[in-house]
Image (cartoon, helix red, strand yellow):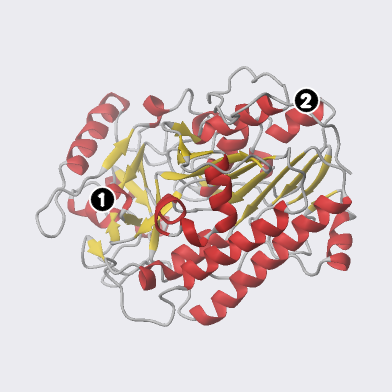
Amino acid sequence: MVIGLDCAAPELVFERWTDELPHLKRLIYSGVSGRLRSTDPPITVPAWASMVTSKDPGQLGFYGFRNRVRYGYGGNRIVDSTDLREPTVWDILGKHGLRSIVIGVPPSYPPKPIRGCLISCFLTPDRSYPHTFPAKLAKEIEREVGAYQFDVDNFRTHDVGSLLERIYEMTRIRFATARYLIQNKPWDFFMMVEMGTDRIHHAFWHYMDEQHVLYRSSPYKDAIREYYRFVDREIGQLLELVDDDTVVMVVSDHGAKRMDGGFCINEWLIRQGLLKLKKPVNQPTPLTPELVDWKQTRAWGYGGYYGRLCINVKGREPHGIVPRSRYEWLRNRIVRELRTMKDEKGNPFKTRVIKPERKYVVTRNIPPDLLIYFGDLYWRSVGSVGMGSLFVYENDTGPDGANHDYEGIFIAAKKGAPVRDEPRALNRLHLMDVAPTILREFGIPRRKGMQGKTIPIRLGPHPDIKKTRP
């Protein structure tokens, strides 16, 4: 059984609030736990896909929610399940005759056939679109549980009171659906992902964190804390439905941290003489292809929780001007400038820059030319122009108080294992370790090409596998 909490923060689970989360605490103190290094980049869609395949984003061929589909200046495409061509753990288990229940693991829209049943992820537009396998499961869920919710409508809003209610309702019905399926469908493997942890971090982190640049006294100071308690209770109810021999993992795709602000990547490129607009822009404006003088532009970037920079290469992009012979020279210049950049106070900005071909085993499809983590991920990338500054403290796509962090959580324990006096902490865990560890629990060898190692989660003898639960 794998319970996924999108964006769960290790410092909250393992340090600050452990005693307030009794069900998670019991798993921590009866099994193994540790910080789980995410993918590069630590972004929801490639991260969950990487977790369940043990392949990196380069092998998967997608590097974020939106990816270039051709060497042009627009037309980025949102990832969906058709882009995931590597076998997932439930695909592999199905080939060995084992049934799975899968709920909300990105990217799983549109739903693909599996041996078992599946509900698609937060990328699903709404319930009018096919979102279950088998298809008839959708009506059964609505009849037996209620109107399933894939995500909240808008988590970047100033109406945080309404948002909080919607996050709770989404989470309540997701766990209710999980309980229903566990009790009424045959299964050997179960995995779900709850998106509420991600949404509540982005919307409420600045109310909780006194170090946040936007912190102010608010009745929502404990909103995240109370929500974690709520999720812990929901996990407890779920665990009551499985036997003591069930191995339970609680994982997250990445962590969360405060967002100090945004770095305006395209404003920086303009000042560096690498990006040229057709005419000046004096108010915040999304960068669109129509604004850019491509015949005088050598590089442009995209906003998001990390920065993506593309180079306008001659013979590759429609109006490319950078000769291939100068491509690496220009990349190195940009890397050097970004790494030595100072913040507004003249302090080192601690920016990390990644060349995709050096990070991944292969680079399928079209990766960014550079991946950039601004300010040690305390700063997001802002793609708009006309901001008037390189450093801004309001997000250009709506209110947002948190950024993604490099490490998520990993907890694994047999449900009935005895509780110890101290937790057993594991180090150097990577998200890609999860898939081969799951397969090992079913006595199935890791597949060729999987990058992760198996995590030592058993403290005693390995029991026989129990086939297909009622």
Comparing 40 with 249, the one in front is: 249
Q: Secondary structure at mark 1?
A: helix
Q: Residue at x 11, y 59 (%)?
A: 345
Q: Quick one: quadrant of the C terminus?
A: top right
| Residue 380 drawn at (x, y percent) | 34, 56
* Quadrant in the picture for residue 308: top left
**SS for tag 2?**
loop
Name of the residue lying farthest toward the front: 421
**Residue furthest to the left:** 346
* Label 1 CA crowd tier, 10 Å (few <14, some 14–19, many 20+): many
Asked if residue 432 lies left or right of residue 95, the reply is: left
Q: Which residue is mark 1?
A: 375
Residue 35 located left or right of residue 277: right
Percent across and percent down for residue 146 are 80, 69
Q: Which quadrant of the figure contains the N terminus?
A: top right
Quarter-of-image position of residue 449:
top right
**What residue sits right under mark 2 in the picture?**
464
Mark nearer the viewer, 1 or 2: 2
> Does residue 320 show up?
yes
Instruction: Let me know if residue 68 appears in the view.
Output: no
